Image (cartoon, rainbow, N blue to C red):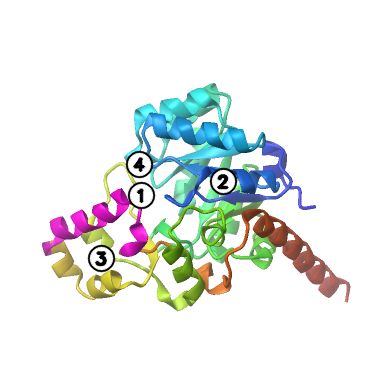
């Protein structure tokens, strides 16, 4: 058993947080991860108060275990956030912008723990000063939104661990199996935030075509889509990030011509937002991390959790034998 400070904080058995990859975080996925001993996450982005409340209720009908609800700071819906706090999940996680003291204090006042994802040591120090309970250090290998010139997890995680001790830190980026989890623990993390591996799970509500792209992709096909900032410039409320995606026809066309993307930003923005409104973002920008190259099958989420833990234990045992030898 791998019982870290993160596990003790949430009374869970596996130091694994399922990342909130919207729209893949079906209640079935969240509940399955939590039932297996990890910590499931509801993705509340683009959800109304009623929709978020319904998702929370559905998860609670499927499990009595702990879970968290994720909110994206630059797109925070106040009504949905208030509904989350009223429901009192074990934790509320933030991403893509500084939550500030106010949001963290509101989470604590509701009796929940505050988790925040950062991309740099500076962001980590700021979040620690706000009083967050857990930090996620996201390396540049990770899927979804990240800093274009950010550090990889191997370099970033130990720096964040040192900067914010004793706050538990989760590693994100490149963790697709138990070896990655073991590496995160060796770097000083208290666990891992895992996205792409759960995207290719049986319970994930991602389109089957999206899952298939993950299975087929090699790591070098999963790229930072730099033209994104020309189409959807970062807001003052958010971090300066661009998505990591599997190269599609859309991505291949526009990554080569960022200046033209800026000229046609209105049209391209409408196309992207249209795919989001249909809950089919993979049609244009199939979000995934470089760990896609490690993933070759769609498996039940519980099997993924248990497999990662057993693989991590075996990897740590192998490392211990090297020292003994």
The residue where tag 2 is placed is 28
Q: Earlier in the sequence, mark 2 or mark 1?
A: 2
Q: Which of marks 2 and 1 is in front?
A: 2
Of the numbered discs in the image, which one, if any, rests on residue 46? 4
Q: Which mark is residue 239?
A: 1
67 is within the stretch colored magenta? no
- Residue 131 in percent (x, y) is at 53, 33
Residue identifier under label 3: 227
| Residue contact between numbered discs 4 and 1, judged by CB atoms under 8 Å | no
N-term-proximal mark, 3 vs 1: 3
Q: Distance between the residues labelled 4 and 1?
A: 18 Å
Question: First in sequence: mark 2 or mark 3?
Answer: 2
Among numbered discs 4 and 1, the one appearing first in the sequence: 4
> Depth-wise, is mark 2 or mark 4 nearer the camera?
2
Relative height, residue 111 to residue 52 (above, below): above
User: Which residue shows up at 15% across the image and 62% down it?
Assistant: 262
Kindly identify the residue that appears in the image at 20 percent across and 56 percent down. Answer: 269
Discs 2, 1 touching: Cβ within 8 Å: no
């Amino acid at each position: 058993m791998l019982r870290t400070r993160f596990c003790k904080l949430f009374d869970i058995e596996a130091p694994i947080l399922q990342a909130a990859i919207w729209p893949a975080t079906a209640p079935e996925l969240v509940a399955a991860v939590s039932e297996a001993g990890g910590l499931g996450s509801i993705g509340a982005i683009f959800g109304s108060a009623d929709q978020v409340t319904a998702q929370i209720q559905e998860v609670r009908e499927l499990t009595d275990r702990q879970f968290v609800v994720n909110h994206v700071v630059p797109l925070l819906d106040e009504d949905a956030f208030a509904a989350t706090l009223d429901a009192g999940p074990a934790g509320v996680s933030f991403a893509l912008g500084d939550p500030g003291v106010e949001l963290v204090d509101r989470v604590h006042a509701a009796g929940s723990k505050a988790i925040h994802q950062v991309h740099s040591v500076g962001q980590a120090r700021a979040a620690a000063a706000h009083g967050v309970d857990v930090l996620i250090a996201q390396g540049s290998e990770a899927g979804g939104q990240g800093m274009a010139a950010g550090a990889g997890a191997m370099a970033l995680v130990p720096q964040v661990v040192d900067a914010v001790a004793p706050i538990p830190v989760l590693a994100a980026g490149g963790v697709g199996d138990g070896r990655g989890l073991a590496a995160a623990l060796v770097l000083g993390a208290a666990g891992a935030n895992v996205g792409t591996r759960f995207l290719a799970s049986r319970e994930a509500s991602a389109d089957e075509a999206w899952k298939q792209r993950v299975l087929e992709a090699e790591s070098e096909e999963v790229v930072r889509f730099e033209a994104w900032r020309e189409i959807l410039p970062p807001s003052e409320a958010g971090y300066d990030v661009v998505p990591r995606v599997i190269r599609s026809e859309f991505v291949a066309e526009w990554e080569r011509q960022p200046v033209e993307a800026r000229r046609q930003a209105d049209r391209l923005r409408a196309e992207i937002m249209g795919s989001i409104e249909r809950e089919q973002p993979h049609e244009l920008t199939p979000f995934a991390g470089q760990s896609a190259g490690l993933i070759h099958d769609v498996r039940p989420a519980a099997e993924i959790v248990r497999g990662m833990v057993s693989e991590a234990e075996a990897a740590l045992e192998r490392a211990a034998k090297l020292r003994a030898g």
